[in-house]
Amino acid sequence: MPDASQIATAINLRVRQLEAQGITGIALANHMIGHMQDLHQIYNTTSDRTLRDLCRRFPGFERYARLMEKVSEQNQAMAAAGTHPYGDLPELPEPLKASLLHVMRAAGELEREFQAAVDGGRGDQAEWLTAKRRRWADDLQKLVHEFQSSDLPLRTQALVQQAVKAMAARIERMGQE
């Protein structure tokens, strides 16, 4: 498992890649959905001092952390007011949650690696990235099947499907560049 500094480095890199493309705000949060669990891990396993140090060393990480804090506060306010659009949906069962987190985390890594290859002109990694994308696509299909086989409300399934379709579309576009 990567340590906090490795996670912050990866988040920082991806934020900077996306910002260079003009992606900011909620669009950045949507692109970075695969890194939410990593950020959560840092919050839960590091001291305040370490977190401040990571923010100082990695400005992209700090911007992402602040953005996600703002999103979280907005979600909590909507939930407390009873106006959250998804407040009535059940929490995912642990096996589905674990599968979803795996696919999301892998998508974030894959997007970052594709972008690094594009930025660095590293065409020599094309075959390796294509194979990795195929493995991710297989994992995604398994996830979709798990959700379709579950007894979760159709609205929950549609929400998850919407999120993973957006990730898959971004990865597919990056794989064609």
Image (cartoon, rainbow, N blue to C red):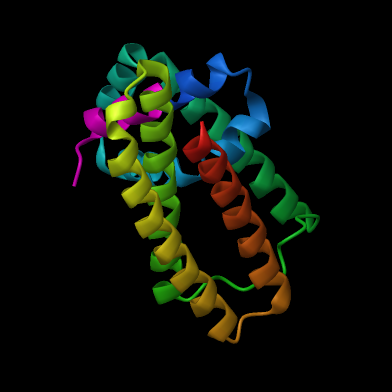
- Is 89 in front, or is 157? 157
Residue 22 lies in quadrant: top right
Image position, residue 92 (x, y; %): 52, 72
- Is 39 in front, or is 175? 175
Name the residue located 41 percent from the left edge and 65 percent from the top edge: 138
Above or below 37: residue 27: above
Name the residue located 65 percent from the left edge and 33 percent from the top edge: 27
Above or below 76: residue 161: below
In the visual, does 65 lie left or right of 165?
left
Image position, residue 38 (x, y; %): 36, 43
Q: Name the dominant secondary structure of the magenta segment.
A: helix
Residue 127 lies in quadrant: top left
Above or below 113: residue 50: above
Name the residue located 51 percent from the left edge and 43 percent from the top edge: 171
Name the residue located 71 percent from the left edge and 77 percent from the top edge: 154
Q: Which residues are magenta?
A: 1-13
Residue 159 lies in quadrant: bottom right
Image position, residue 96 (x, y; %): 45, 72
Above or below 91: residue 69: above
Q: Is 30 within the magenta?
A: no
Task: Give the number of callouts.
Answer: 0
- Is 75 in front, or is 36? 36
Q: Is 6 within the magenta?
A: yes
Image position, residue 147 (x, y; %): 55, 76
In the visual, does 108 lie left or right of 1?
right
- Is 127 in front, or is 75? 127
